[in-house]
Amino acid sequence: MLPYRLSFEHPTYLWLLLGLPVLWFLGYQSLAVLGKTRRALALLLRSLVWTVLVFALAGVQVVRVSDRMTVMYVLDQSESIPLAKRQVMLDYVVRNVRRHRDARRQDRAGIIVFGRDASIEIPPFDDDIRLRRLESLLDRADATNLESALNLAQATMSADTARRIVVVTDGNENLGQARKLVARVAAAGIGIDVVPVMLDAKSEVLVEKIDLPTDIRKGQPFEARIVVSNYADNAGSDAEPTKGKIRVKQKVGDNESILLEQDITLENGKNVFPLRHTIDRPAPYIYEAEFVPAGDDDDGLRQNNSATAYTHVRGQGRVLLIEDRSNEGDFDLMVDRLRDNNIEVVTQFNDDLFGSLAELQAYDAVILAGVPRVSGDSDNKIVSFSDAQIEMLVRNTQQLGAGLLMIGGPEAFGAGGWTGTELEKAMPVDFKIKNAKVQAVGALALIMHASEMADGNHWQKVICKSAIEQLGPSDLAGVLHWSFNGDAWLWGGQQGLLEVGPNRRAMLARVSKMTPGDMPQFDPAMKMAAKSLAAAPASVKHCIIISDGDPSDPTPGTINAFKNASISISTVAVASHGLAGSQRLQNIATATGGKYYSVKSGRALPRIFQREARRVSKPLVYEPPGGAVPEVIFPHPLLDGIDRVLPPVSGFVMTQTKDSPLAQVLIQSPKPEQPENATILAAWTYGLGRTAALTTDAGARWAGAWNDWADYDKFYSQLVRWLMRPTGDTGKFTIATQVEDGQVQVVVNALAEDDSFLDFLEMNATALDAELNPIPLEMRQTAPGRYVGSFPANSAGSYFVNVVPTAGATPLTTGVTVPYSDEYRVRETNLSLIESLAKTQPRGGAAGEVTPPLEQRPGAESVDSDPFRGGLALARSIRDAWPWFVLGGCCLFLGDVMIRRIALDFSWIGRLIRRLRGEKVDQSAAVTRLDALRKSKAQLGDDLEKRRASVRFEPTRVDGSDEPVDLADPGQPRKGSLPESPKDEPAPTSYTERLLEAKRRARKDKPDGE
């Protein structure tokens, strides 16, 4: 049977083939003159032309039918399956493909692995699989997403073969819905076989949860319940109980205390242990319960032996103030005045920062009091805010409604290295100066020397980018590195320094492609840096050298060039070669007034360069001669009752007014002339919280005149209270959370003062996942006074929920912790899902099979199952053929014209054959035929002559005598006229005959001599 067939996209046009009989009838009569053979051939060609054109109109297609088979093996690599069983899966696939794949038919096989996500291990190809271990190591195997695996398998297999998916899994799906997708897979004609992986049903203990009341209040005793499930492998009346120890801890920030630790005996099934406790201090609390089995055989998995719960007991407003350890005491006056106004303030230094978002929930506002992002003098003392901590501060305000205040100082805002961070986005001002009138104020040159540290070039790129990102748009930057052509600037030509603002992206791109070489000596590069920095129009100039100390010492003249131009050099010794290399770099830094750092790991480098890059940002600190008297330019509730005549300040950090109508500048300095850079106090609402920027300090350096100001207390207390999220009693609103089927359900009950239901409230809710990413949360009323919302809990970790019941109400804040993945909750294979997948019947084929389960090694029964068998609809590949049919019809039409216009004599073929055979050819027939042709030619010539004569006209010659003519009697013959025709000669009947007759008469009357 041929593998190709024809199909039609528009078969209705095939009715036009009924016109063939009409075509034959008309052509049979009109083509009779061609003879029988030519007429038959012409009719055949016309029929073919008509048929081909009708097929083209019907959208003819060529369908290729193939019995080739593509089998994709989908392997479950989630954490619920032991590692030994995962290797058994691969061994099964290798043996199964080798035994059943038909190489002559060019069958294909491939592998897909999946956990939370799916990945192609081997795309389908026509050869045996030779693989000893899986290379696609899934980063997230904490879930079983069979739906994504089936979807990827369908997209991977080509439609020009029959297709079958072999799923090797325990069936414990906890993400996605494979049952819904399998219907679409079957509709595509794809069969599904399932190889079950049987889990060992050993004794298993799961700490299910810690159940806390939803209305815990300060000083009120409450009861917590720890739920522990015990699954025994010999469950029954004679099952022995499981012994162990239960331990319950309470965490408040960094403090941890044990509330309960006792020996317990678990009966089979669920066990509940109560715990009486009282909370005396408002704060966020995390409770953790852990079960420790007495013997190793009493519990199969240890990952599911703990659970956590979160609760937040609110009290009066609390504020967290973070200050720099090196400037301890600069904000003591402000802290004391806030406490005098009944605002509880907790101080924290930047070398002992918070570690989680849960710790921040104890505070209703956070104050960054003149603190830089990075501080310290050496690698061992350098401390910084990590990106994660900055993200926590921002999310705590934007999503959870806390306030955020940033107070100025010589190392705050842009001068403190906060430029380009998420914190800048949350503030009502930008830290980069964009005004064209502000000249370039800082210049930074980086000298990069390849080091022998692990991943040295990578870290050099990281620190270059970190330094460039810290610079303002008007600053200058350049990078010097050594190549085979010697020392050269990475950009900027001979000058090397370019303005960062318009070139920042290009600079970062060039740094990504940089490959520093092993610099032989410091002097050439340092001379180039000194020359460019000295010529730069900057008020602060700084150079940073990173090296292992191998290059030779710079000359004294080079060092003097830096000192004379007031250019400082900071050096970083990375994996230096002994004391000599370190001493060389230390001498360079000491001679020019810079800093020296010695590091062993590249991870410390970005913090060092962020700190050093701040040196060129110092001009952002604005200290006008004689100071300035700030002015209130916008009335705001936080300034109510405050004297509009403010004390003077001697300096502040210049910022840029945010290009947003929501950002409000409340207090402004008359200096400098650019008002967008003269902000003293600005505020706005950011998400669910509020933020404010006070660019001067609290009185230690610039605002000393404010210390004796009568409204000092009122100004700071009103500012902080305006920022704080609403505090106090939450009324009769309660919030509760629970985790079920991978979803966190949030329930809020709302009652009025008289215990009546509060209905139709528009609640504003938000949630944060374990990575601090915001999650949409919509609260909908499901019953009188009851509002429910949910969001997915896709990974283990802590989730935070903030619900504002009504406008201006105290937020309801809670959290829920997913201690471990649902993969550790399962104990048995889900045969129900496995059977439902295999029973699905694909279009045009038979349902799949459930093979014998995999054991500790691939059994003969499972390997004998043939996934390359038939039972599926043959694959069809379709291609449009109507353009070729149109071309063929045109060619056939030309053949039809040729047959009708050209008479072909094929008798010469017979004569040639007889001549080749040696037979005598009869010439008489040829002579007779030739005579007939000559006779026909002569007759045709006569006919043509007659026709030419009949149409030629020759006028009768007229006598030229002058005899007058009697006009009265025109019918009278004239003398000398032609005699009348004989009476017996018939008169001409036509015009042509009359003309011929006149011609003959003229010839007769012509004289002989003429």
Image (tube, helix red, strand yellow):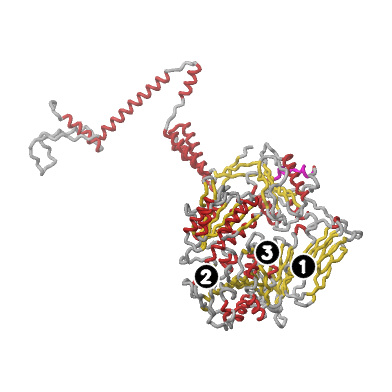
Whole-percent x, y for residue 718 in the image: 61, 79
Residue nearest the observer in this picture, 247 or 915 = 247
- The quadrant the N terminus occupies is top right
Give the residues drawn in magenta, as a range: 861-873
Q: What kind of secondary structure does the magenta stretch mostly adopt?
A: loop
How much space separates mark 1 and mark 3, taking CA atoms? 24 Å
Would you name the residue on which mark 3 appears?
769
Q: Secondary structure at mark 1?
A: strand
Whole-percent x, y for residue 927 in the image: 40, 19
- The quadrant the C terminus occupies is top left
749 lies left or right of 657? right
Q: Nearer the viewer, mark 2 or mark 3?
A: 2
Residue nearest the observer in this picture, 27 or 384 = 384
Occupied quadrant, residue 951 = top left
Q: Secondary structure at mark 3?
A: loop
Q: Nearer the viewer, mark 1 or mark 3?
A: 1
Residue nearest the observer in this picture, 568 or 867 = 568
Would you name the residue on which mark 1 appears?
256
Disc 1 packing (10 Å; few <14; some 14–19; many ≥20)? few
